Amino acid sequence: MTEHAATGTTATGPTTIESTTIESTTIGLATTGRTAAGHAGVLARRAVSGQAPPPRAGLVRGLLRTTRPRQWIKNTLVVAAPAAAGELFTPRALVQLPLVFVLFTACAAAVYLVNDARDADADLAHPVKRHRPVAAGQVPVPVAYGVGGALAVLAPSAAAWLCPPYTAALLTAYLGLQLAYCVSLKHVLVVDLAVVTTGFLMRAMIGGLALGIPLSRWFLITTGFGALFMVAAKRYSEAVQLADRAGATRALLTEYTAGYLRFVWQLAAGVAVLGYCLWALEEGGVPTTGVLPWRQLSMVAFVLAVLRYAVFADRGTAGEPEDVILRDRALTLIGVVWLTMYGLAVADW
């Protein structure tokens, strides 16, 4: 009896251990299965929502993309005032203008970084903006805020040290206005158009301020309303293209009507053309010695350029102004002709 009991106990021990081992293995496999299923579910939800997994590109590349290198072409407006005054190639201009371009680009980059950090969640619902590095997770939101804040401090500080005082003051004003736009002003009707337009106008003004060039009223009128023309055309195009996509457009665009935005860009185009023509026809009492009246002739190219751009605005395809300007060969050719005539007029050839 004792031997049988001992034998039974000995037999039961391995059976119990084996049973426990099998049960643990089963639980482990089940847990692993649930983990894999959960991971697959996350990937499936990302695929359904259209959210791509975080990209593998480096942080530096993501930061560079966030600063919108394609938008840097707008900062070439810093040469507008010196070019109009015929001082584009003076020794001082050759030193100051590249510096001003870099500083303004840094300020604009700071605004883009802060804006994308604030709008990261909203951008996920946009068909294009969801691929921005911050929204896609390539650039963490705190990093975007940190780099943007550093640029916002360093650029005006460098301008105060290396440029005339008005340059640093204008950069500071630009940053303040654009950051206010990111926080609240972009949600205010009409004010949002005025703020973006003012940003373009500041770009055109800063080159003259850096070189101490007086800015004429016609220059400011033409530049300001020309910028409003492009900004309103961009908004109109966004409203037309994204009208049928719920949650994929700016909230403020739902407050504008397409008819109102069309009215704004048409009005702005007319005022810009009028301002340019008045400049071209105003001799200022100074006789010209050029072979041809280049200033007056440049009106033709300017008006044609506005009319050509208006074609894309009317179609609702002027959502990316830089693409319209660089990809349309006819508009590029008209622009080259206008620049040539404008240069000849300034040089008085």
Image (cartoon, rainbow, N blue to C red):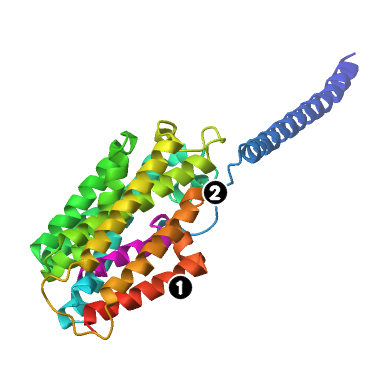
Residue 32, by quadrant, is: top right
Instruction: Give the extent of the magenta segment.
Output: 64-81
Q: Residue 306 lies in what quarter of the image? A: bottom left
Disc number for residue 243: none
The one nearer the camera, 267 or 100, is 267
Which of 28 and 336 lies nearest the eye of the viewer?
336
Residue 230 at x, y = what percent? Answer: 38, 53
Compared across the picture, whether 305 is left or right of 24 comes to: left
The image shows residue 97, relative to residue 263, as above or below, that is below
Residue identifier under label 1: 333
User: Residue 216 in the image: x percent, y percent?
Assistant: 15, 63
Report if the CB atoms under discs 1 and 2 are less than 8 Å apart: no
SS state under label 2: loop
Asked which secondary structure carries label 1, the reply is helix
- Sequence order check: which comes first, mark 1 or mark 2? 2
Q: Nearer the viewer, mark 1 or mark 2?
A: 1
Amino acid under label 1? Leu
Residue 80 lies in the magenta-colored region: yes
Residue 121 appears anywhere in the view: no
Residue at which label 2 appears: 54
* 176 over 40 or under it: above or below: below
Q: Return the x and y of residue 131 as percentages of the image width and height.
A: 52, 49
Viewer-side residue, 232 vs 31:
232
Number of labelled discs? 2
